[in-house]
Amino acid sequence: MRDDLTAVLVTEEQIRERLAAMAKQIEADYAGRDLLLVGVLRGAVMVMADLARHLDRHVEMDWMAISSYGSGTTSSGVVRILKDLDTDITGRHVLLVEDIIDTGLTLSWLVRNLSSRNPASVDLCTLLRKPEAQRMAVEVSYVGFDIPNEFVVGYGLDYGERYRNLRCIGTLAPAVYTSDTRGEHGPSADR
Ligand code: PRP
């Protein structure tokens, strides 16, 4: 898998160090308050698992699965819930955990949706953010890395459901998607 990358943007070590630092900040910010981590399937699985294990405090974890309507080439911002939370978040402090904020459309919809359920607070934590791609202003409390507007895979991020289990984050070699015979249309069709 590693050989399919043209460049490593964020190493395994950098991810570990950054998540540890973000966890320290989260511990300080939520001291004395309960905390519910909400992960957005599927990309956030790795971030959620590692961030949570860096937190030296009690947390609950829940998951949502969503699907974006649209042309298939870009996020539309219109979202359908495939799996909702099992937790009633009324009065709870919610921290949404994401792998990447790209256009910001998904997260801005999610924040609005969760805020309508009367939580005590809703905040965002993302490992990656693409400032150049952002179309919707989203206030993010915890950002791991700002990255260029390039298609990236690894550490939860996929290309055609592959590469999620790569330990680092990198850019795919064009040969991977030009030779793809599984009906994929290249990174621009994905994220
Ligand atoms: C990714 C990511 C966010 C969304 C961000 O999910 O996990 O949920 O895209 O994009 P946006 O800022 O442009 O809205 P994706 O749709 O790739 O699904 P996945 O997590 O199952 O891979």
Image (spheres, helix red, strand yellow):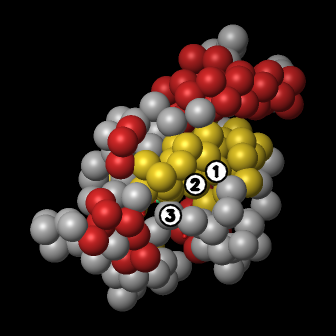
According to the picture, the residue beneath numbered tag 3 turns out to be: 151
According to the picture, the residue beneath numbered tag 2 turns out to be: 100
Looking at the image, is mark 1 or mark 3 nearer the viewer? 3
Q: Is residue 158 above or below residue 68?
A: above
Residues marked 1 and 3 touching at CB (< 8 Å): no
Q: Which numbered disc, 1 or 3, marks the residue that appears first in the sequence?
A: 1
| Quarter of the figure with residue 129 | bottom right
Identity of the residue drawn at 49% across and 27% down: 49
Looking at the image, is mark 3 or mark 2 nearer the viewer? 3
* Secondary element at tag 2: strand
According to the picture, the residue beneath numbered tag 1 turns out to be: 128
**Which quarter of the rendering shows the N terminus?**
top left
Identity of the residue drawn at 48% across and 78% down: 75
| Amino acid type, label 1 | Leu
> 50 left or right of 111?
left
- Residue 17 in view in this figure: yes
**Mark linked to residue 96:** none
Identity of the residue drawn at 68% across and 80% down: 135
Give the alpha-carbon distance from disc 1 to disc 3, as whole Å.
12 Å
Q: Nearer the viewer, residue 190 or 93?
A: 190
Q: Which numbered disc, 3 or 2, marks the residue that appears first in the sequence?
A: 2
> 166 left or right of 37?
left
Give the alpha-carbon distance from disc 2 to disc 1, as whole Å.
5 Å
| Amino acid type, label 3 | Phe
Residues marked 2 and 1 touching at CB (< 8 Å): yes
Percent coordinates x, y for residue 158 in the rendering: 37, 53
Q: Nearer the viewer, residue 112 or 135?
A: 135
